[in-house]
Amino acid sequence: MPIGTRHILRDGGLLPVPQYFNVTKDEFQEIQGNKGAMFVQLRGLSAKEPISGSTDTDHIFTEQMHGFVIKNDGTNDLTFTIHNYTFTVKEGEVFEESFEPFTQVIIKTTSPFRAYGKG
């Protein structure tokens, strides 16, 4: 039967519980995580296109990325820019964050770094 013909699951206070529609069993089923917490698995944010160096780099990704990770392996600060926002990464730091979709990162540095996009 179509999903629109099934009622969602509710708790004793008639509030909706976390659930998903199981098309194989044709029913809503409660989501049960570890120790009462909901289980969430993010998809589509895998590491892609690793880059490294120790000089200024203007990298164009081959597809849209949604996250970026960079490790400053040097002793001087580095900066990188995505969407006209510039971030500073101090020596030894790791920066990891999600962004609106982007294809370009501009890294300004004299320190060695390792980085990758998450798409």
Image (tube, rainbow, N blue to C red):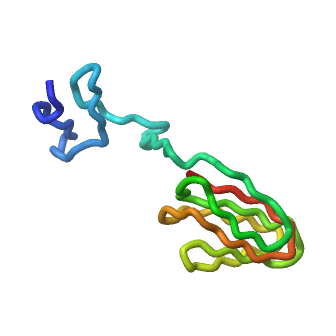
Q: Quadrant of residue 82?
A: bottom right
Up-down relation of residue 115 to residue 10 (above or below): below
Give me the residue at 80% from left, 67% from top.
72
Q: Nearer the viewer, residue 34 or 74?
A: 74
Give me the residue at 57% from left, 59% from top.
67
Q: Nearer the viewer, residue 33 or 3?
A: 3
- Number of on-image labels: 0
Q: Position of residue 56 (x, y in %)?
A: 79, 74
Q: Position of residue 20 (x, y in %)?
A: 30, 36
Image side of residue 39 versus residue 89, left or right: left
Give me the residue at 64% from left, 48% from top.
47
Image quadrant containing the N terminus: top left
Up-down relation of residue 54 to residue 2 (above or below): below
Q: Position of residue 69 (x, y in %)?
A: 67, 60
The residue furthest right is 75
Image side of residue 40 versus residue 19, left or right: right
Image side of residue 54 versus residue 27, left or right: right
Give me the residue at 22% from left, 23% from top.
26
The residue furthest top is 25
Q: Quadrant of residue 21?
A: top left
Q: Position of residue 17 (x, y in %)?
A: 27, 42
